[in-house]
Amino acid sequence: MAAEGVEDRRRVPMVHVCAGIPARPRTTAGGNRRMLDTATSFRLSEVIGALSHALDLTEGQPVGHSQRSCMIGMELGARLGLPGEVLRDLFYAILLKDAGCSSSAARMCELFATDDRALKRDFAFVDWTSTADFVRYAARNVAPGQSAFSRAGSLLRALRGIAREADDLNNARCDRGARIVAMLGFPPAASEAVRALDEHWDGSGRPDGLVGDAIPLISRIACLSQTAEIFMSADGPRAALDVVRERRGRWFDPEISDLFLAIGPDDPLWTRLAGDSVAEALRDLEPRDGIAMADEEGLDRVAEAFASVIDTKSPYTARHSTGVATYAVAIGAEMGFDALRLRSLRRAGLLHDIGKLGVSNLILDKQGKLTDEEFREVRNHPLYTHQILSRMDAFADIAEAAASHHERIDGRGYHRGIGGDRLGTEARILAVADVYEALTADRPYRGPMPRETALGILWKDAGTAFDPECVAALQVASAELDGQV
Ligand SMILES: [Fe+2]
Ligand SMILES: [Fe+2]
């Protein structure tokens, strides 16, 4: 059976399903660079589970929100007696339910003149189907720190903006999330479930105002699970039970609500949800008859999908991550990297800014000079990148390089201020690729800088900020790439 499993993994190159226990990653003696071969495969639930932390950050939720929602959903799915394949779709649909969340962050931030994460965090507690509740929510959050007069004007503008754009913002979020789930290779049932996540049993939801059984079952379970988790994390199990009781038959399917209410405040589920080993608990909840695995090509696809989530967060950096990955690979190839090393470098390029999902668009998209506090927050994004990537076996080998893309060889970069010998070649390449992409990309507020001008800027700082060898490699490689990125 084991030999068969290996054969299967070799034949199916993308995210796929196989029976049994996953193969563990092999590492070199140094442990830093994984031996990439066709038999290396990772349990997909661990990869997606860890990356769901980045989605939690973007939603302003406590880390682990998606995983805990998944635990609640799987408990309900088991009590409903759902078959294995539906449970599997439910499992991944909940973990990836917020994959489209970054698409509305910038505009929400702009409309309300406040931190999008705080805005989203508070929104999760609001019954937005009630106009009065929504207006109170808007009044509470709009333009904090401004005068009462100014806030009143901002409130009017925000409410007018939402009235005009709510459908577009919501559709973009739902469609984007569904597209990411499909991009990862999950069945249509999982992506459709993500699209219909905010539909309500009584038809008051969105994006299509579906009613009752017309809402996919997985969406009905996921909608209740995420709301229950938010209230539980804030105020304990009784708050979760209260909100489900209160919204039963309005937001939530009555039958699923009753199953949830039957759990009761003393059920061991709450202890498991409050514990530190949610990731381990989730591992046991994935349907045993079809554990999804990701081989190396599957991991490439995961990195591409999350690069798309990152790039969608800000209109000013659309395609930044894919561009950095392309330039980094071109530099690495010019410097003689082999295919395995280039593959890791590409993933590091795709995911280097994943920590930005934890930074408010109020800061990321600010046109003026950043305050000291704002700059401190920006400087933390490589740290968040490291925290997110290093917790996964699948991407731990790229965490160090990805999180060092703002370091300088003279040690005056961030987030740790390391330089010299402590800065690996991959990190030096990413630093060059990152700045070159930023300078040459087309932005809403300016056109792309010509290649020669951008290279001139990099050469000016070669030897202090940038490694001259990497800049020289980029100079050669970018001539061929010009116009292709
Ligand atoms: Fe960055
Ligand atoms: Fe970047």
Image (cartoon, rainbow, N blue to C red):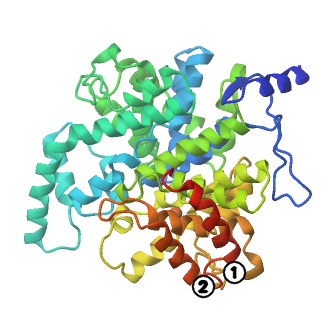
Q: What's the residue type where badge 2 is placed?
A: Arg
Q: Disc 1 designates what residue?
A: 419
Along the viewing direction, whichever of 232 and 63 lies nearer the viewer: 63
Along the viewing direction, whichever of 361 and 405 lies nearer the viewer: 405
**Labels 1 & 2 near each other (Cβ < 8 A):** yes
Q: Tell me if mark 2 has few (under 14), some (14-19) or many (20+) residues whose alpha carbon lies within 10 angstroms of its own.
A: some
**The residue carrying mark 2 has its beta carbon less than 8 Å from ligand 1:** no
Q: Is residue 221 visible?
A: no
Residue 391 horizontal/vertical position (percent) = 68, 54
Q: Secondary structure at mark 1?
A: loop
Relative to residue 437, is residue 242 depicted above or below?
A: above
Residue 189 horizontal/vertical position (percent) = 48, 20
Residue 328 horizontal/vertical position (percent) = 63, 59
Q: What's the residue type where badge 1 is placed?
A: Gly
CA gap, disc 1 and disc 2: 7 Å
* Residue drawn at (19%, 43%) of the image: 165
